[in-house]
Amino acid sequence: MRSLDPQAESLNDRIHRDNPAIYDLLSAKGKAVYFPHLGIVKQSADARGKAIDATIGIAVEDDGTPMRFHAIADRLRVDPKQSFTYASSYGKPELRKKWQEMIRAKNPSMKATVSLPVVSHALTHGLSLAGYLFVDPGDVILVPDMYWENYDLLFGLAYGAKLSFFNTFKGQGLDLDAFEKGLKALGPKKIVLLTFPNNPTGYTPTEAEQEHMVRLLTAEAEAGHRVLVLADDAYFGLVYESGVARESIFARLADGHENLLAVKIDGATKEDYVWGFRVGFVTYGSRGITAATCSALEDKTAGALRGSISNASHLSQTLVFEGFSAPDYDTVKKEKYEILKNRYQRVKAVLAANGKRYADAFTPLPFNSGYFMCVKLAEGLSAEAVRQTLLAKYDTGVIALGRLIRVAFSAVPEGKIEPLFENIYKACRE
Ligand SMILES: Cc1ncc(COP(=O)(O)O)c(C=O)c1O
């Protein structure tokens, strides 16, 4: 491999000096990457505010505002300078700061130093950045065996990782023995990828389960292993039962151990109902992480981002920031949460009323949060066959995953929830 750019060396030296375990966790690409502060970006910054600025790669009108089509501009009530131009590769500074404050507000027990979030092109891209920075070909990533299938493409195909699975459930809770066994079986670089509320099951650990997971992960770090925990918090905040962990496992791990780096990958996509806007964040936490390491990791993340998508949509970032700053943001967020919670409770009620009858066709897996729940079909039934029957005869669409059917109750109005389960039952009977 060619020798590293001096800008990468300088970031690596900083991380290695202050937080050597984090340095050890970087992939070869993660060690090599840097943000090119010394190039065009710096020269453009130097020219900012000059009477004549011939540095930036956009076109401007004669009045200095961004060149634009009125057919587009007339549809936007947003300052053209906050939408048509490029955003920084790090993301809009005010949005990064706001999101960091929001992470703290949503995870009040988190006292640890954490980095300033870098804005990604939503969570898929945030996960991909984590792959870029920390995953080398052949690395093993521990995930529950009920997982979002895109991890295969994201980590398996794109970064050559091998996914290792632990059994998700034992009884009505997580199979933490399987988790512990899976964790122990990993090599000295232990990468764990956790999504809670989980896709596809809609399960979030109870407080006690989360505590147990934190203990197991921290114990591996105490034993001298290097531990990377990727917290995919796509559905964060949508918890519907008491006793279930309300804070992200990231909040607990950010102050867990010097040998453990927690990466929070989250965003507005599902939490704030802007799926197509593509605004996500990548944030780092580790016990004893210094400001110098945080900024070096932010630089590396922005460098990887610059080398892939250059920067995330400025328009989307502006809209999302405006949304977060609106006076009724908290009220509307609560209203939307209540709608989803009511649908969740309707599902629970339908299953409670009809569970005995349904049992010869399917049984629900544990769920308490998020957008989804799953039912496991009775022995001998094929989820794909049931799905096809639902489409052909019952005007109903669901996702088939092996012997599971995933139901996105988030997308079904309350009045259609009972018919949905009746349809699944009838399709199973056929
Ligand atoms: C667990 C999980 N993570 C990430 C994502 C992707 O989120 P985004 O649309 O922000 O890329 C999804 C979307 O389905 C998901 O289920």
Image: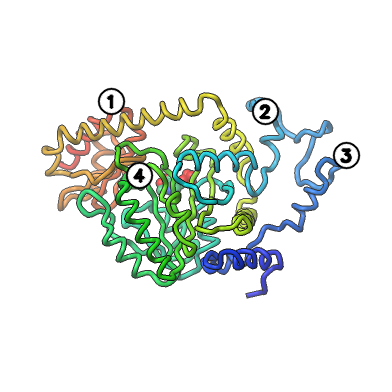
Q: Which residue is drawn at 67% across and 43% down?
A: 87
Mark 4 lies on residue: 245
Whether 333 is drawn above or below 139: the answer is: above
First along the sequence among labels 4 and 1: 4
Q: In this view, does 254 lie to the left or right of 399?
A: right
First along the sequence among labels 2 and 3: 3
In space, the residues marked 2 and 3 are separated at their CA atoms by 29 Å
Whether 239 is drawn above or below 27: the answer is: above
Whether 158 is drawn above or below 76: the answer is: below
Mark 1 lies on residue: 415
Residue type at mark 1: give it.
Gly
Q: Residue at x 26, y 56 (%)?
A: 175
First along the sequence among labels 1 and 2: 2
Q: Position of residue 350 (x, y in %)?
A: 20, 32
Say which of marks 1 and 3 sits in front.
3
Q: Position of residue 180 (x, y in %)?
A: 31, 63
Say which of marks 3 and 4 sits in front.
4
Q: How crowded is mark 2: few (under 14 residues within 10 Å), some or many (20 or more)?
A: few
Mark 2 lies on residue: 71
Q: 284 or 333: nearer the eye?
A: 284
In space, the residues marked 3 and 4 are separated at their CA atoms by 54 Å
Mark 3 lies on residue: 51
In space, the residues marked 1 and 2 are separated at their CA atoms by 40 Å
The coloring applied to the image is rainbow
Q: Where is residue 354 in the image (x, y as percent from the top left)?
A: 15, 34
Q: Tags 2 and 3 in contact by the CB under 8 Å rule?
A: no
Q: Label 4: state its secondary structure.
A: loop
Say which of marks 1 and 2 sits in front.
1
In space, the residues marked 2 and 4 are separated at their CA atoms by 47 Å
Q: Label 1: state its secondary structure.
A: helix
Q: Which residue is drawn at 78% across and 48% down?
A: 45
